[in-house]
Image: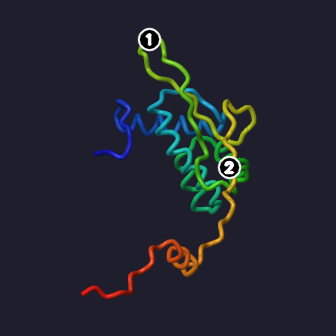
Amino acid sequence: MTKFRKLGRPAAHRVSMLKTMVSQLVKHERIETTVAKAKEIRRLADNMVELGKEGTLHAARRAAAFVRGDDVLHKLFTELAYRYKDRVGGYTRFLRTRIRMGDAAPMAYIEFVDRENELREANLPKPQPPQRTPLDPWAKSRASQQWASPKDNSKSG
């Protein structure tokens, strides 16, 4: 079983296409593609942002081996790394848009979150529920003894 989608292409064509699409996503911050390709791009683009956040020379060389263009590499290590410095993961989202005429392929937008002109705003983090005071185990047992039926101490026999 493979760990990625083959997308109906030979390996060299698939890798080349994904490198180009990730580079275009970083450059334009939103692209429209098929749903299957968007799911693959999401995985790879999140890895590239992680390399940008890492900021080391080794990470820069690994990213340069994948993305195309010095402007894309610069944007990854400056703008995107700064934008997502506090975010742990989930840098991209994809939104299903339409069914393509001709081959009826489901299409989707894939975009970076927390950017200007988003198609859908990011969900705000839910507030934490108020802290409850822990119950004292002895108080609980006293309460259960209060409602328990009285023991019969008389011996039968």
Please say whether residue 154 is visible from this viewpoint.
Answer: yes
Residue 112 locus on image (x, y percent): 64, 40
Camera-nearest residue between 84 and 56? 84
Is 52 located above or below residue 43 in the figure? below
Camera-nearest residue between 50 and 62? 50
Q: Which label is found at residue 125? A: 2
Disc 1 element: loop
The amino acid type of the residue labelled 1 equals Gly
Horizontal side of 67 relative to 40 (left or right) equals: right
The amino acid type of the residue labelled 2 equals Pro
Q: Which residue is mark 1?
A: 102
Horizontal side of 149 relative to 60 (left or right) equals: left
Q: Quadrant of residue 94?
A: top right
Is 129 located above or below residue 7 in the figure? below
Q: Nearer the viewer, mark 1 or mark 2?
A: 2
Horizontal side of 12 relative to 139 (left or right) equals: left
Q: Quadrant of residue 72?
A: top right
Q: Residue furthest right?
A: 116
Residue 16 locus on image (x, y percent): 46, 37
